[in-house]
Image (spheres, rainbow, N blue to C red):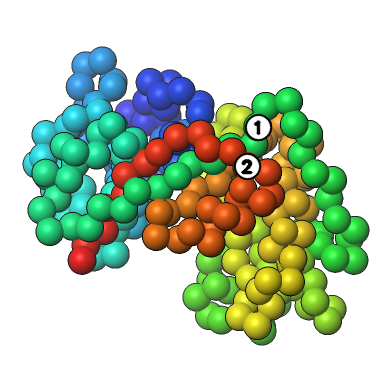
Amino acid sequence: MSVAHLARALLDEPRWVETRSMLLAEDAAVTGLTGDHRTFVARALSRPLVAVVGHPEALFLADAVAQAGADVTVLCADEYGARAERALPGWRRIGAQILAWPGGVPLPAAPPATEARLLEPDEVAALGHLPRALHRDLLAASADSLVAGAFSGGAPVSFCHAAALTETLWDIAVTTLDGYRRRGLATRAVQCLMAEMREDGWWPVWGAEDDNPASLAFARRLGFTDSGRLALFRKE
């Protein structure tokens, strides 16, 4: 049975963007589902991520994380965090601030194409100057998402793509190569993709873990405002 219909049990709002994205893409195995569809565990099939909705029995969460692998991240809305924490003894709980673009505020214009532009999939494939793990991630992203690159010295060195996508929202993923940070390149990559995605009706969402204050500060400098809280869990 398709799991996409379960996304309708959750509002299309920033804090649910990753959970609803995996459901809408049918990239999830769901267990512990209650009759009202408001409690379940969703394990992503393509990456080590488990989402908890409501208050499922601990055994369903334990089974999902066992199948997801050692580097899995468990996420849930902050109000569900206490029960999830009890079901994950020995795991580290991390808070995360979810930010959204404020209503009524226009998105910034895209920078000049000489500074940042969309990259074609074959361009991403040819980026031999990237670390292997980043190159692999961008290749995977380019199969399903637009990828924007900001340039320095004629080569793209900062990259932005959609890590999750719902009917109206997309979750920003941005990475800048070592040696090129604090030069405004990430801002250009993000603004480039924000402008492009808005043309198709999508608004950006930003997630910043509490132990990454630089990410939170960057989001606020760009113009994002607080929208909700998540609880994340990772093995120590």
Q: Residue 54: percent from the left, percent from the top?
A: 25, 28
Q: How many marks?
A: 2
Q: Residue 139: percent from the left, percent from the top?
A: 59, 66
Q: Distance from label 2 to label 1 (Cα)? A: 7 Å
Q: Residue 60: percent from the left, percent from the top?
A: 14, 40
Q: Amino acid at mark 1?
A: Pro
Who's the residue at 75% across and 51% down the image? 191
Tag 2's secondary structure? loop
Residue 107 occupies quadrant: top right
- Picture layout, residue 229 above or below residue 10: below
Q: Amino acid at mark 2?
A: Phe
The residue beneath circle 2 is: 224
Q: Residue 59: percent from the left, percent from the top?
A: 9, 41
Q: Residues within 10 Å of mark 2 (few under 14, many from 20)?
A: some
Contact? badges 2 and 1 (CB < 8 Å):
yes
Who's the residue at 28% across and 22% down the image? 38
Camera-side residue: 29 or 205?
Answer: 205
Residue 159 visible somewhere in the drawing? yes
Residue 68 occupies quadrant: bottom left
- Picture layout, residue 194 above or below residue 39: below
The residue beneath circle 1 is: 102
If you read the primary sequence from the N terminus, does the residue marked by circle 2 or circle 1 appear first?
A: 1
Tag 1's secondary structure? loop
Residue 67 visible somewhere in the drawing? no
Who's the residue at 25% across and 34% down the image? 80
Who's the residue at 21% across and 35% down the image? 31
